[in-house]
Image (cartoon, coloured by chain):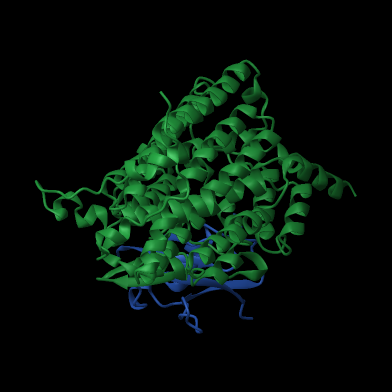
Chain colours: A blue, B green
Amino acid sequence: MALFPLTSNFEGDFVLQLVPVDTENTMDEVAAAAAVHSVGRRVRARPGCILRVRKQGAEDFLPRTMKVAEAGFMPTETVEILWEAAPH
Amino acid sequence: MALLNRMDWYDLARTTNWTPTYVSDGELFPAGLAGDYGLPQDAWEKYDEPYKQTYPEYVKVQREKDAGAYSVKAALERSRIFENADPGWKSVMKAHYGAIARGEYAAASAEARMMRFSRAPGMRNMATLGCLDEIRHGQMQLYFPHEHVSKDRQMDWAFKAYDTNEWAMIAARHFFDDIMMTRDAISVSIMLTFSVETGFTNMQFLGLAADAAEAGDHTFANLISSIQTDESRHAQIGGPALKILIENGRKEEAQRRVDIAVWGAWKLFSVLTGPIMDYYTPLEHRKQSFKEFMEEWIVAQFERALTDMGLELPWYWEQFLADLSETHHGMHLGSYYWRPTVWWNPAAGVTPQERAWLEEKYPGWNDTWGQCWDVIIDNVVDGNMAKAYPETLPYVCNMCQLPILGTPGKKWNVKDYPLEYKGRLYHFGSEVDRWVFQQEPERYAGHLSIVDRFLAGMIQPMDLSGALQYMNIAPGECGDDAHNYAWAEVYRAMRAQRNAG
């Protein structure tokens, strides 16, 4: 358990933002923490979509249950938060 | 007694490169202050300033300029122009004075470095007058806003801004400290006078004076015009120095200095001038878009200045031209959304008519920045103001110190340009900002951006109140919407009509 700063690059938003998370947070929780500062502020919610996390430049999303401590992030590293159609 | 004509004695009078006997050449011109370009002394003596003026001529002309600007101010003091001005125009004045006035005093110090430490006698002469110019600009741009301080606390930032850690001021100081306060005399002549003043501020002041006249603020228009006439003279200090460097095989070093300074100036312009021209200026007073202004006055003129000099266009020129349609929209959206952290009241500038103008000038605006504004507008109309203000910090660039941003909405292209250096992760807003850092990493590596300071625990408590306290923004000085959200009424009416239908 430790506070860990990440930089959020949220799909559809215009600016990178500082998002403090916890090393025990999952990627779903990271996405939710990032959404607080973008969705409903400058980005419309997308019903039927979930949010996924990937490292900048990566093609694949990180597993939804992966913890911050397991992802190998550097403090303040930029993560991209993207919309994905919700699994049925 | 008949006086000699100026040109009969000017060259002789400024031949002041004597042979020192009490000190060594290195003591007279220390490398850190004079520059260490390895050129022989006689190369610098060929410096030929294009604008020759003697001290008596200078004093006579300056006295007349001062008399003109101050008399217009005195005549219009009771005109209530300030009280009756559009709030967007007041924001232009506040942003301008805060960002510029005290920087003029800093520029006087930079001119003084050229005056004392340049090896070129002609440059020393021009910079003597340039230094006096900058002192005059500092004095005027503090005296003129002072009459408004009792009416509006934000006007106090004309003096106060430079001493604060307000984020835009950190950005301005970082840039000016880099190009004019911590460089040798020759670099200052290239980076400040040639790159920033010839390239940007000279033209910017012309445009601003025209905008002021259009807005009916003749005091401000006269002030700015008066300053611009000095600027157009002392901006010519760098040209002959560049010529000497190029003729003596130092083009690469000269070009690098130009490339660094032009990019930094562009980024500052994108946050200070872009929003003013495309959002704060009332629609009926807009003559050109920011992009059109930049293309006509800055790009065309500066391209000519560079090629005339024998320099290349900066390597990032295509990127710069593309950014003219994008960067300042993000800077505006950022300074508006984080408005409590600026010392002026940003005008939103997004009524349906204004949006139509933006769409015409920047095709695709509604599908990109417009999408972010749609959400902000909904929140304002719904009275959901908690969502119309921020709850975290934007990540800022470790070079320009401005938010790292890009195009949102359907053309989302926001990207970080990171760099790990000696174990620390730096973030940059563009390839060019990162390139500037890489030219001389140790010069910049120790600086902490506002976000770095927050993460280091220097801002307490770690929330908006702590941030405002750190930035020295007192109650009553925080920025908010320039028109108190009156512009949202039309959207409220449109929604009521839609609901009724």
Residue at 57%, 20% (x, y): give it. Answer: B71
Please state the horizontal and vertical placement of residue B302, each as a whole percent of the image.
55, 59
Task: Give the side of residue B348 with respect to residue B201, left or right.
Answer: right
Q: Is residue B464 above or below residue B357?
A: above
B146 or B214: nearer the eye? Answer: B214
Residue at 53%, 52% (x, y): give it. Answer: B200
Q: Is residue B116 above or below residue B86?
A: below
Residue B261 seen by the camera: yes
Asked which quadrant contains residue B475, the reply is: top left
The N terminus of chain B: image quadrant = top left
Residue at 48%, 23% (x, y): give it. Answer: B146
Residue found at the very far right of the displayed protein = B501
Q: Is residue B416 above or below residue B389?
A: below
B478 or B119: nearer the eye? Answer: B119
Task: Give the side of residue B474 with respect to residue B302, left or right.
Answer: left
Please state the horizontal and vertical placement of residue B138, each as a whole percent of the image.
42, 33
Please state the horizontal and vertical placement of residue B470, each as a whole percent of the image.
35, 41
Residue at 60%, 48% (x, y): give it. Answer: B275
Please state the horizontal and vertical placement of residue B28, each as a whole percent of the image.
17, 49
Residue found at the very far left of the displayed protein = B22
Residue B468 seen by the camera: no
